[in-house]
Image (tube, grey):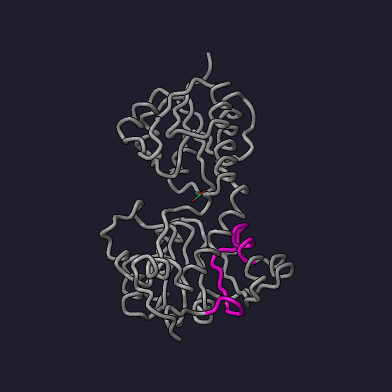
Amino acid sequence: MKPRVFVTRALPEEAMNILQEHLQCRIWEEADIPVPRDVLLKEAKAADGLYTLLTEKVDEELLSLSPRLKVIANMAVGYDNIDIAAARKRGIVVTNTPGVLNETTADLTFALMMATARRLVEAAEFVKQGNWKTWSPMQLTGPDIYGATLGVIGMGRIGEAVVRRAKGFDMNIMYYNRNRKPEAEQELGIVYASMDELLQQSDFVVVLTPLTPETRHLIGARELSMMKPSAVLINTSRGPVVDEQALYDALRQKTIWAAGLDVFEQEPIGPDHPLLQLENLVALPHIGSASIATRRKMAVMAAENLVSALTGKEPPNRVV
Ligand code: DGY
């Protein structure tokens, strides 16, 4: 009999085909509504494998109620939705989808940086609302990206892809990372800085670090207070890396110039959230990897990981 899996969202056809060829699939069919927790727990209890998205919390409770579970294939490079220590303790394999989304996420990071600095969302709304009466010298102006100083916090593969784009804009680039990366320094001409130096000197601070207990609220009131009043903060990693209350205060008091966020402490962020009332905040709904091709590749990759692990092979992208 084929191993039984629960797939927590409708997937692109090519991914579904891979799964259905080898596995007995139960699927949460709703495209835009996450599987309710009680359904997830019930399905996981009877499953050999789970195909999850970052919206599903795979924690101690779920694992302790799922005696058959052998594999969790997450359709994301990040896996902070999964309690890795608890999975490891039970010998459950966890996989992710690294690599395929680097360039796409770097594109979005750069787009968000430009949209925030040059006030694209506000400007488009200005036209649509009929507020464009004339051209005037300082109307909707913002800081230059070309030639500015970029500070990247978290120099992984996405960070490197952002740097390659920034070089086309003649930016001065510094980075902070837990481990220094001499090869990247050499190859990309980037300069290592301490967090404090980076925050003090950058015109654009881009946060790209994974969410771990160490990086939760890495950017808080102290860090924001070190940034230039003209600086822009961009976060395309995970929401909790930035303390949103501290960011709200900094944006409202204009101790930094603007922020662009693709990720939030609570997702989805509600329309009444104070942050969304600010003019100097550009908000996106976690679409860093959302190109058609990349999302298809991620879906297939996670499917292949799940099938491999449940058919006795080493899955290509194993986390634990
Ligand atoms: C990830 O993969 O971790 C992203 O946040 C979604 O693409």
Q: Position of residue 125 (x, y in %)?
A: 38, 66
Whether residue 308 appears in this view of the structure is yes
Residue located 54% across and 77% down the image: 198
- Asked if 83 appears above or below 170 in the picture, the reply is above
- Outermost residue on the bottom side: it is 137
Q: Position of residue 141 (x, y in %)?
A: 46, 80
Which part of the image, by quadrant, shows the C terminus? top right
- In this view, the residue in front, 18 or 174, is 18
- Asked if 171 appears above or below 21 in the picture, the reply is below
Residue 292's quadrant in the figure?
A: top right
- Outermost residue on the front side: it is 133
- Outermost residue on the left side: it is 272
Q: Position of residue 169 (x, y in %)?
A: 64, 73
Whether residue 320 appears in this view of the structure is no
Residue located 35% across and 76% down the image: 250
Residue located 73% across and 70% down the image: 186
Q: Does the magenta-highlighted stretch encompass residue 31?
A: no
Task: Please count the marks in the image.
Answer: 0
Q: Does the magenta-highlighted stretch encompass residue 153?
A: yes
Query: Relative to 117, is 35 on the left or the right?
Result: left
Q: Position of residue 312 (x, y in %)?
A: 62, 25
Residue located 56% across and 32% down the image: 15
Query: Which residues fall within the magenta stretch?
Result: 144-163
- In this view, the residue in front, 138 or 77, is 138
- Asked if 225 appears above or below 41 in the picture, the reply is below
